[in-house]
Amino acid sequence: MTFGFGKKRKQSKEQAEELVRRYYDEIYVFAYRQTFNKDTAMDLTQEILISVLRSYDTYDPTKASLRTWIYRIATNRIIDYRRSRTARDHEYLPLDAVEEAVSDSFVQETENRELLEQIEAYVSAFPAATQQVFRFRLYADLSFAEIADLLSMSEASVKTVYYRLIKQIRKEFSDEY
């Protein structure tokens, strides 16, 4: 479905409502998995979708799918949010705990919330491009090829960034134990 927000007012409103209906839940879950707070996730979701609607005229379907483009906006907004928060002290955890947290199922396990917050705090200190790869891979469940497309990088570069970050997480957390 294409959304033409610059056209007739009624049609634009209907298309905007359809876009919000289609992506709200998905973007909310994406934000919640990174903030661990329902209210913050709701606020971020609203800000993200408003940004999407405001900048829709800049969307180029030849560069990325609509979903991928929305995730790019979402990821950048969440990175900005995390930068704006004050830095917190965090404890280092054993390597086994980090490996468990950085797995496909880690976001589903609410008992690991503290660990996830610590990993988030650690990852938030990295450059935006590294954070984007991490967030797209773990929170949006995008493939390396999709991430490469989205970030205009080679798939090999995306994998290198991702696995280098995972190695750094392991090293950082295992040094304390």
Image: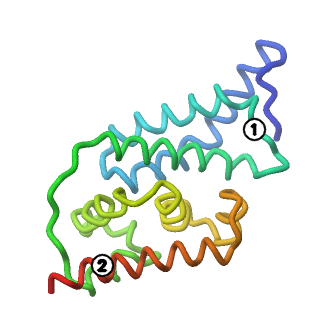
Mark 2, Cα crowd under 10 Å, few <14 / some 14-19 / many 20+, is many
Quadrant for residue 102, please give it: bottom left
Percent of width and height locating residue 162: 51, 73
Quadrant for residue 112, please give it: bottom left
Q: Is residue 120 left or right of residue 17?
A: left
Amino acid marked by disc 1: Tyr
- Report the residue at 40% width, 56% height from top: 33
Amino acid marked by disc 2: Val
- Classify 49 as above or below 127: above
User: Which residue is more in the foreground, 56 or 175?
Assistant: 175
Q: Is residue 54 left or right of residue 139?
A: right
User: Which residue is more in the foreground, 147 or 48?
Assistant: 147
Percent of width and height locating residue 68: 67, 52
Identify the residue under disc 2: 98
- Report the residue at 54% width, 67% height from top: 137
Query: Which mark is first along the chain, 2 or 1?
Result: 1
Identify the residue under disc 1: 59
Mark 1, Cα crowd under 10 Å, few <14 / some 14-19 / many 20+, is some
Q: CA distance from mark 1 to mark 2?
A: 37 Å
- Report the residue at 49% width, 65% height from top: 134
- Classify 67 as above or below 9: below
- Report the residue at 52% width, 49% height from top: 75
Percent of width and height locating residue 41: 39, 42
SS type, badge 1 = loop
Quadrant for residue 111, please give it: bottom left
- Classify 75 as above or below 153: above
User: Which residue is more in the foreground, 41 or 161?
Assistant: 161
Residues tagged 1 and 2 counted as in contact (Cβ below 8 A): no
Q: Is residue 82 left or right of residue 175?
A: right
Q: Which mark is residue 27?
A: none
Quadrant assignment for the N terminus: top right
SS type, badge 2 = helix
